Amino acid sequence: MKIAVYPGSFDPMTNGHLDIIKRAAKTFDKVYVAILNNSAKTPAFPLSQRIDWLKRATKELDNVEIDSFSGLLVNYANEKNANIIIKGLRAVSDFEYEFQMALTNRALSPNIETMFLMTNGKYSYLSSSIVKEIARFGGSLNGLVPDFMIEEVTNEITKNQ
Ligand code: ADP
């Protein structure tokens, strides 16, 4: 079994994330989408909300499971018997940090391989921060997040302003 973990904040999930999830689901037997629950960071959206959006967006993908974790990613991956970590790469600017993380994770757990999926050209500029910024100033989220999320993301962002 090729079991992979795709970690991230998913604050909120975007179509860029979903594209990576769908492609990973075709390549691996099982994919855990693992939301980092980091007490040092204050996310814009509660964990339960981020889980719910990911679950709804991936409900047709039988081999994808939505989960959350705290602590070291390699410990979580080992718990799940996963030996692959998936990362998306958007631009050269992602590379340096991801390179450092991949080497760190290999040093911590040499049995785990990090694999990079290149962004879909359509989403190369897309990030959770961009989505929040657009929502905050009343722009359209069409095509950036799944349709069912648009109103919920916008309401949640504007209610906190
Ligand atoms: P972001 O970087 O958007 O704040 P995350 O920390 O949740 O989001 O990212 C989780 C993973 O998804 C990372 O590996 C990141 O590089 C990847 N990712 C995020 N957005 C995209 C995108 N538009 N295309 C490809 N990969 C992406």
Image (cartoon, grey):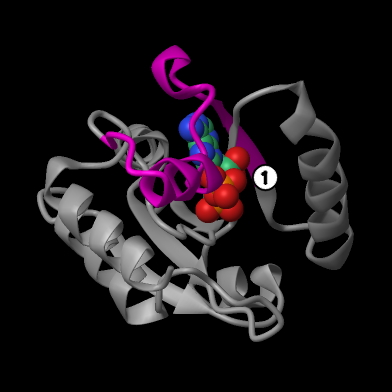
Whether residue 40 is situated above or below residue 122 in the rendered picture: below
Q: Which residue is found at the position 32% from the left and 71% from the top?
A: 159
**Quadrant (top left, top right, bottom left, bottom right) of the C terminus:** bottom left
Q: For this rendering, which residue is in front, 153 or 64?
A: 153
Secondary structure under tag 1 reads strand
Instruction: Give the amino acid type for the residue marked by disc 1 in the picture.
Output: Thr
* Ligand 1 image position (quadrant): top right
Respond yes or no on whether mark 1 lies under 8 Å from ligand 1: no
Q: Which residue is found at the position 76% from the left and 22% from the top?
A: 92
- Residue at the disc numbered 1: 114
Looking at the image, how many numbered discs can be counted on the residues?
1
Instruction: Kindly tell me whether residue 58 is visible in this rendering.
Output: no
**Quadrant in the picture for residue 53:** bottom left
Q: For this rendering, which residue is in front, 64 or 54?
A: 54
Whether residue 82 is situated above or below residue 13 in the rendered picture: below
Q: Which residue is found at the position 46% from the left and 57% from the top?
A: 10
Q: Which residue is found at the position 32% from the left and 34% from the top?
A: 144
Question: Residue 99 at what x, y percent from top left?
Answer: 83, 39
Q: Is residue 135 magenta?
A: yes
62 to the left or right of 120: left
**Quadrant in the picture for residue 123:** top left
Whether residue 37 is situated above or below residue 9 in the rendered picture: below
Question: Residue 21 at what x, y percent from top left?
Answer: 36, 42
Residue stretch rendered in magenta on the structure: 114-141
30 to the left or right of 88: left
Question: Residue 158 at what x, y percent from top left?
Answer: 34, 62
